[in-house]
Image (spheres, grey):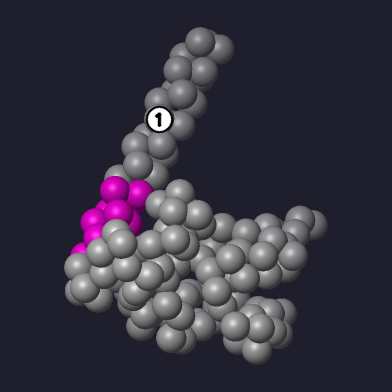
Amino acid sequence: MLVKETLKRCRSGQERVDAARRRLAHSHRLLNRAWWTAGASDGEALGTTGVIHIDCRKPSGEPSEYLLSFGGNRDGVGAFSLGKAIGFDHLTAFLRNLGVPDPAMRTALQVLMAEPHHKIQNVTLTRAHIRELGL
């Protein structure tokens, strides 16, 4: 009985890993398309400008978890995942690494105290940012 339950959980975990791998591959395809559209190449400091979407998950009794994505203008449509941050300090560091200006960062933190979603418009993501994030 215990072996069956363990195998069931392992298979379930593997399905989640496979799903995450597919989402990551999809994000890479979207990112490559965005770079092609912006006309950037490896040697250029140019980037692509878009919207950073921040979604807050608030588990009870734990620090808030923030999911960040970049891309589409409407509710993350066409966006790809940048990663997640736990708590305001980690979120602030993440946004600073992406080159988000301080006023936009302060606004985002204030909005996220009351709302579960916020968009930061006109953020330019460069190849250096992508390399730092390991995408």
Dot 1: within a 10 Å radius of its alpha carbon, few (fewer than 14), some, or many (20 or more) residues? few
73 vs 83, left or right, is: left
Q: Quadrant of residue 12?
A: top left
11 vs 78, left or right, is: right
124 and 62: which is toward the camera: 124
Q: Residue at x 25, y 75 (%)?
A: 38
What residue is shown with label 1? 14
Measured from the top left, where is residue 58 in percent x and y? 67, 64
18 vs 29, left or right, is: right
User: Looking at the picture, does residue 31 appear above or below residue 55?
Assistant: above
Q: Residue at x 44, y 54 (%)?
A: 131
User: Looking at the picture, does residue 57 appear above or below residue 114?
Assistant: above
Q: Residue at x 40, y 52 (%)?
A: 135
Extent of the magenta region: 23-33
Per the image, label 1 sits on a secondary structure element best described as helix
Q: Residue at x 38, y 62 (%)?
A: 127
